Image (tube, rainbow, N blue to C red):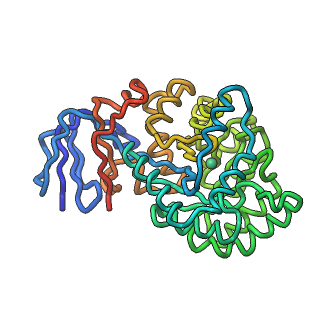
Amino acid sequence: MSTLIDNIGLLVTNETDRPERENAALVIDDGHVAWVGDAGSGPDADERIDADGRCIIPGFVDSHSHIVFAGDRSDEFEARMTGQKYAAGGIRRTVGLTRQATDAELAANTARLVAEMRAQGTTTIEIKSGYGLTTVDEARALAIAKTFTAETTFLGAHVVPAEFADDPAGYVALVTGEMLEACAPHAKWIDVFCDVGAFDVDQARVILDAGMARGLGARMHGAQLGPSGAVRLAVELGAASVDHCTFLTDEDVDALAGSDTVATLLPGVEFSTRQPYPDARRLIDAGVTVALACDCNPGSSFTSSMPFCMAVAVRDMRFSPAEALWAATAGGAAALRRTDIGGLAIGQRADLVILDAPSYVHLAYRPGVPLVQRVIAAP
Ligand SMILES: [Zn+2]
């Protein structure tokens, strides 16, 4: 089955030498991009779509989400907006509700959020565990996540659960032992929340080392709540991504710039917790590979919208619209170490979004407006 999409006003392929084309056409064959060229000059195909001058972009790659959970924390958001500060402890509240939920309830909530993301143009998602924090509950979260994506991440080291409050070393032993054994078959990645109130750098090293020894790739939550050695540890261990990067030292930026560890920025968190945004220009100008992701979760960032995150990145973090789109597509792909997604070059997956707009600039120019006309994704 092949499809010719003709009369594309602006096509973003993210190819290095020519990332954008005006008046373009594209052919999809068997779920992959088979041809790219000028409008009106495409080869015959089984099906033809007239884009009527609209802009087509690669599907968004949301490389950071926590969407297997139960419950609602809108009351915490309301409290923060009226003057209270975000603390990592709120995670434990979702843990309690998630443990009580049935498999069917968790799967239904996840499916609803995945559908929300898809409707807003996201074609690849990463999903973390981290609201179970027992061997059984972490493994079932990952088994559910795996029914929605291949990009599943074991985050048993999200916080120390209440029952281990007096024995954090015992919890690290559980995470790196029995829990890892049960979760690794369902996970591609291992992640750790290395920050004030969560796990310190020494614990994070032990946890990531154990996961890598079990064949998982490393990722990290770091420098969200304060500066630490988290970012340099992520780079040292060859992590695919270190996420948040709100509080960075010069040494952190230098380490990232000289590495293939992606800095994934999550502006929904700063928006929803009223924290200062990360200094994105410092990272981009230093040559660091930067991704944007939603961090969809019920506590600190309950948005599933990549266009919203792009709009905040442009308005408040001084990304150019082109940089924000790249970070939300190719940047996310780099954060997942994927070359088959995040762009529309020949041979890549034909995961794309037809925007009801002549340019992707409208994603930030018209914040909050549903501009996704159609999403096409490879099976
Ligand atoms: Zn997160």
Q: Position of residue 282 (x, y in %)?
A: 63, 30
User: Could you say which is closer to the camera, residue 41 or residue 141?
Assistant: 141
Q: Farthest residue in the right direction?
A: 166
Q: As displayed, is residue 86 above or below residue 189?
A: above
Q: Where does residue 351 sit, x and y in percent of width and height?
A: 34, 52
Q: Residue at point 13% right, 54% down?
A: 47
How far across and down, in percent of the image, does residue 242 sit?
Answer: 64, 48
Write the residue at 67% across / 40% down: 245
What residue sits 41% from the left and 42% below the top?
Answer: 16
> Measured along the vertical axis of the image, is residue 32 above or below residue 80?
below
Left-right relation of 153 to 90: left
Question: Residue 60's quadrant in the figure?
Answer: top left
Q: Can residue 188 be seen in this view?
A: no
Q: Residue 226 occupies which quadrant of the picture?
A: top right
Q: Where 272 falls versus 335 (above or below)?
A: above
The quarter of the image holding the C terminus is bottom left
Residue 354 placement, left or right of 187: left
Q: Is residue 27 visible in this depiction of the protein?
A: yes
On the rendered structure, is 22 left or right of 246?
left
- Of the 4 image quadrants, the one containing the N terminus is bottom left
Q: In this view, does 270 lie to the left or right of 168?
A: left
The quadrant in which residue 25 appears is top left
x, y (%) of residue 254? 70, 39
Q: Which of 358 and 231 is in front in this view?
A: 358
Callout count: 0
